[in-house]
Image (tube, rainbow, N blue to C red):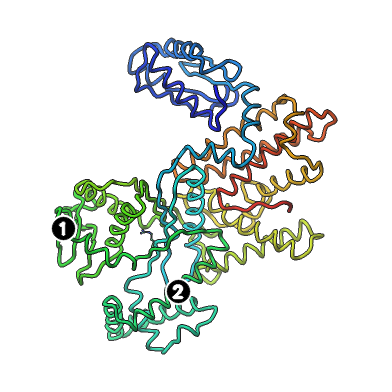
Amino acid sequence: MQVQLNPIKTIEVALQEIASQTAGFDIKFCPGVRLADPKFGDYQANGVLGHAKITRENPRKLAQSLIDSANNSGQFDSDMVNLSLAGPGFINFKLTAKFYWQWLQKFAAPSDFELGAGRIKKDRRIVIDYPSANTAKQAHIGHLRPMVIGEAIARLLDFCGAKTTRDNHIGDWGTNFGTLIMQIKREGVELDALGDDALVKLDQLYKDGSALELKQPEIRTKSRNELVKLQAGDPENAAIWQKIVAISKVAFDQIFKQLGVSVDVSLGESFYQDKVGRIYKELSEIGLAEESQGALVVWHDEVKKFSRNNERPYPFNIRKKDGASNYASTDLATVLYRVETYRAQEVIYLTDSRQQDHFQQLFLTTEKWFSQKKYPLPLMRHVYWGTILGEDKKPFKTKSGQTIRLQALLDEARERAFQVVTQKNPALSESERRRIGDIIGVGALKYADLSSNRTLDYEFNWDRMLSFEGNTAPYLLYAVARINSIFRKVNVDPENLLIEASPLETATEFALARKLIEFIHAVELSLNDLRPHFLCTYLYELAGCYSSFYNSDKVMVDSSAVRARRLLICARTRTVLQIGLNLLGISTLERM
Ligand code: ARG
């Protein structure tokens, strides 16, 4: 067996092929290889049981014949992996010390891992729609999750070889612009002169404008007229709109920079205004969309809640009564654009869970529309999440009950981390403590978000996320820094260690190596489900294995062969931790 980044895959594929040539099996047989309890080996295949149930054969006999074929196939040399029959018909796989050693040799630099991982999604064209906030509103805590989760997913996809396009689908069109323009004109605001806090002021103008509209109906008419003028291309309103969009962009870019978010394109809702006409036409022509009380709607009768005979009719409304486009029309135009322009094979949308119905209706509509028009249908997925809660288990707010601004949250994270660093390391210069605090603070904020299962709510807790113990960013960053300090002391190039090193010996060395080999499995789990917390859990466990190893097996022993191999394991652990943290969008530190 060749040493691959992901032995599970190699074993799965080989076993499937061998089974297809073994009596009692067929091509439909699925080996079902997964990680095993270390007591039994490295991997376990449980597919024979299910297969035997269908063919009504003795599962143990069947499993044994598969093991025999595998051993005779030449694909499972006994010096690399050993197969054994277990329980009612499981097949256990135990990788040999030689395999472990070769794996550690082969996967050394980050580029070796990239090469191996790059096959998983090789050249698949994927558009990731994030963070897609709305123009003219300040970033608040609700924007943290799309930025952090979106960036992690995008990095995972890049790492696995996909051709990604990060498309920031900003909400830069809609009724709020009528209100905003009305209020800007009412107050005679000079948009160019708003200064640094321009977005804060726009936010306030909108709030004031909306409040007025509620009190005075004639103001609402004014706002609506401004919107109509904007949509008809009135030069004055278009110029105001452009300035608003530019102000938002500057403010968002500042946040993106701090959070390490990198978007490729920002094609907002306004970009699709001249493309919605085709949507109305095509969907009406194929009989998918129909007029309903002046609006254009699509019914999905096969889904109770979107069907006509639901008590509260809830169709996909793709054009408003007044003829204006809406969120649904632009999103339909957007799918088509992504398929025609980027030839997208997958589109991943990130929003909070409140938009689940919208995306369900969007996907259903697109499937039916594309199948009739014979357009290539991309795989569409909606990545959503739960709420960030405060200690009172209610949505996390400021003490006075306000929404927390994202910039304030970032500033507080940095300041608190600075305090922690100062406590631990008072001897460092202030600027160094600030620099380290910035990385720990932002990393901790991100990691706390990524390490919880995204579909669940999670409780925001500064002390917990900044703790050096537990499943936190500081704990992982500290593991990396500790390994760095070893190498600062010995000052060797880990790759030169290979010649001197002796093969693994102790149980903790093996346990750590085993965990290292599991890395790509964790990446795949995260990717399949688009849930970065699997990777977090893995990194936490890896750091735990490293701690056990470090506590029980002294690294700087006299025997140069033992020292060399232990240093080598340290170096590999550092590489995997660094790759993993980088995939999560978290920078590491040389020392802390
Ligand atoms: N701007 C939207 C919001 O803030 C999110 C857009 C998500 N993307 C999309 N293609 N609908 O809720």
- Relative placement, left or right, of 433 versus 114 is right
* Badge number at residue 284: 1
Look at 82% across and 60% down and name the residue there: 427
Look at 28% across and 57% down and name the residue there: 332
Residue, disc 2: 246
Comparing labels 2 and 1, the label whose residue is closer to the camera: 2
Mark 1: give few (<14), some (14-19) or many (20+) Cα within 10 Å: some
- The amino acid type, in three-letter code, at marker 1 is Ser
Q: Quadrant of residue 287?
A: bottom left
Residue 10: percent from the left, percent from the top? 49, 27
61 shown above or below 116: above
Residue 524: percent from the left, percent from the top? 49, 38
Residue 359: percent from the left, percent from the top? 32, 54
Q: Quadrant of ligand 1?
A: bottom left
Mark 2: give few (<14), some (14-19) or many (20+) Cα within 10 Å: some
Q: CA distance from mark 2 to mark 1?
A: 36 Å
In the rendered image, the residue lying farthest to the right is 558
- The amino acid type, in three-letter code, at marker 2 is Ala
Judged from the image, the secondary structure of the residue bearing numbered disc 1 is: helix
Residue 513: percent from the left, percent from the top? 65, 31
Ligand 1 has an atom within 8 Å of the beta carbon of the residue at disc 1: no
